[in-house]
């Protein structure tokens, strides 16, 4: 299970994630461990959203492994990835072994060769049968500036 499986209804989370067994009636001795488990899951999710994922794979088949574990790429699930190589043809993206799915530009078309650039960051959003991104990309320095700004705003630095 992962943070992507959690519910916005508190009662539904009692058994939604075996890594964070938040059952009613848990003893006070279990509370510190539950809090650490929750912190760990949230840290994984933050890493997934903050560009800690670097793709692997071969040719135009990109593979990404998240810390939070995407089991089903439901519409709207998003991960920020840094790609390890340029594309030479229509790319696919396989997140956490969910299967290679077309990786399309925001307009629904495959990006042309060279549009996916090594070292660039892309926010991949599950949409329909594939993933969509804006293949204008975020330069490394821009991503670092955004991360520092976010840390300052949210008190991380």
Image: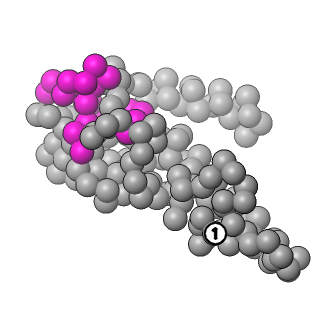
Left or right: where 155 falls relative to 129: right
Q: Nearer the viewer, residue 64 or 20?
A: 20
- Up/down of 10 relative to 36, above or below: above
**Range drawn in magenta:** 101-126
Near mark 1 (Cα within 10 A), the count class, few <14, some 14-19 or many ≥20, is some
Residue in the image at 53% along x and 40% along y: 50
Residue at label 1?
Answer: 15
Q: Position of residue 39 (x, y in %)?
A: 70, 59
Residue in the image at 79% along x and 71% along y: 24
Residue in the image at 20% along x and 24% along y: 109
Q: Which of 44 and 99 is in front in this view?
A: 99
Q: Which of 146 and 34 is in front in this view?
A: 34
Left or right: where 112 falls relative to 62: left
| Residue with the most extreme left position | 89
- Up/down of 72 relative to 104, above or below: below
Find residue 11 and report its image quarter: bottom right
Q: Which of 52 and 131 is in front in this view?
A: 131
In the rendered structure, does residue 23 fall within the stretch colored magenta?
no
Residue in the image at 36% along x and 57% along y: 96
Mark yes or no: residue 16 visible: yes
Q: What element carries label 1?
A: loop
Find residue 28 and report its image quarter: bottom right
Mark yes or no: residue 43 visible: no
Q: Where is residue 42 in the image (x, y as percent from the top left)?
A: 64, 53
């Amino acid at each position: 299970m992962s943070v992507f499986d959690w519910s916005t209804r508190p009662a539904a989370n009692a058994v939604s994630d075996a890594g964070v067994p938040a059952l009613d009636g848990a003893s006070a001795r279990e509370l510190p461990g539950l809090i650490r488990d929750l912190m760990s899951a949230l840290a994984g999710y933050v890493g997934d959203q903050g560009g800690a994922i670097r793709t692997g794979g071969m040719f135009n088949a990109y593979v990404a492994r998240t810390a939070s574990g995407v089991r089903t790429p439901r519409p709207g699930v998003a991960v920020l990835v840094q790609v390890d190589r340029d594309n030479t043809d229509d790319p696919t993206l396989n997140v956490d072994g969910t299967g290679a799915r077309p990786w399309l530009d925001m307009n629904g078309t495959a990006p042309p060769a060279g549009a996916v650039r090594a070292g660039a960051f892309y926010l991949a959003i599950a949409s329909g049968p594939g993933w969509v991104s804006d293949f204008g990309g975020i330069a490394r320095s821009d991503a670092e500036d955004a991360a520092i700004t976010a840390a300052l705003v949210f008190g991380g630095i």
